[in-house]
Amino acid sequence: MRKKIQNFWYYYKAAVIIALVIVAAGAWLLVQQKKAERPDYEAALVSPEYYSEEQIESLKDALQKAGADSNGDGKVSVNLKVYRIALGEEGQDANVIGALDADLVGKVSGLFLLSDPVKFEEVTNGICRAADAVPAAECEALRGLGFDGLSLAVREGADEKYAVMLKELTA
């Protein structure tokens, strides 16, 4: 029996080692996937204006207070992406345009904070309807944070939780 094992190991050593490495890598990927934090909400700020980190954090806090724990982890988390872009103008940063396109095509963000909802509706072929956009100035939770010139809109076909969050913000 010992001779069989030695022969097997001699001929299949590389295959066994490769298989073990693949299994270990797969296990590591599964553990990382389970550990990854999944936000309850995905939001995007689309504006040519510059906002400080403090303003962005205060906006995230306001959105978290208006939201509910939808992924069951016991806390409300919002992933807020900032796209500093003037829609429809020439000479925009291609990386920002590409990231925004990926967000729109992948239907990642459900809530948009827009500097120009009419232009956003035109450029994106109606991803968010300008008629349904709510001025941030009407949102009690956002008053005094420096976002009064923006409007909030829910992406067409987004999960109902975004509409509920928007109602909470305007209540």
Image (spheres, rainbow, N blue to C red):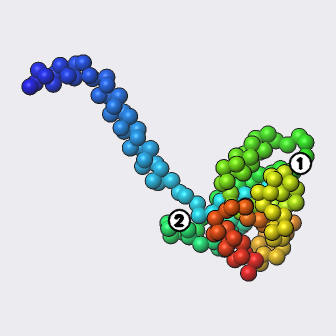
- Callouts 2 and 1 close, C-beta under 8 Å: no
Residue 162 percent coordinates (x, y): 67, 68
Q: Residue furthest right?
A: 89
Mark with earlier residue (2, 1): 2
Q: Is residue 17 above or below residue 27?
A: above
Residue 18 percent coordinates (x, y): 35, 28
Badge count: 2
Secondary structure at badge 2 equals: loop
* Residue type highlighted by circle 1: Gly
In this picture, residue 70 sits left or right of residue 170: left
Structural distance between the alpha carbons of marks 2 and 1: 36 Å
Corner quadrant of residue 141: bottom right
Residue 3 percent coordinates (x, y): 11, 20
Q: Which residue is mark 2?
A: 71
* Residue type highlighted by circle 2: Asn
* Quadrant (top left, top right, bottom left, bottom right) of the C terminus: bottom right
Q: Which residue is mark 1?
A: 88
Secondary structure at badge 1 equals: loop
Q: Nearer the viewer, residue 52 or 124?
A: 124
Q: Which residue is depicted at the point 50% across and 67% down? A: 72
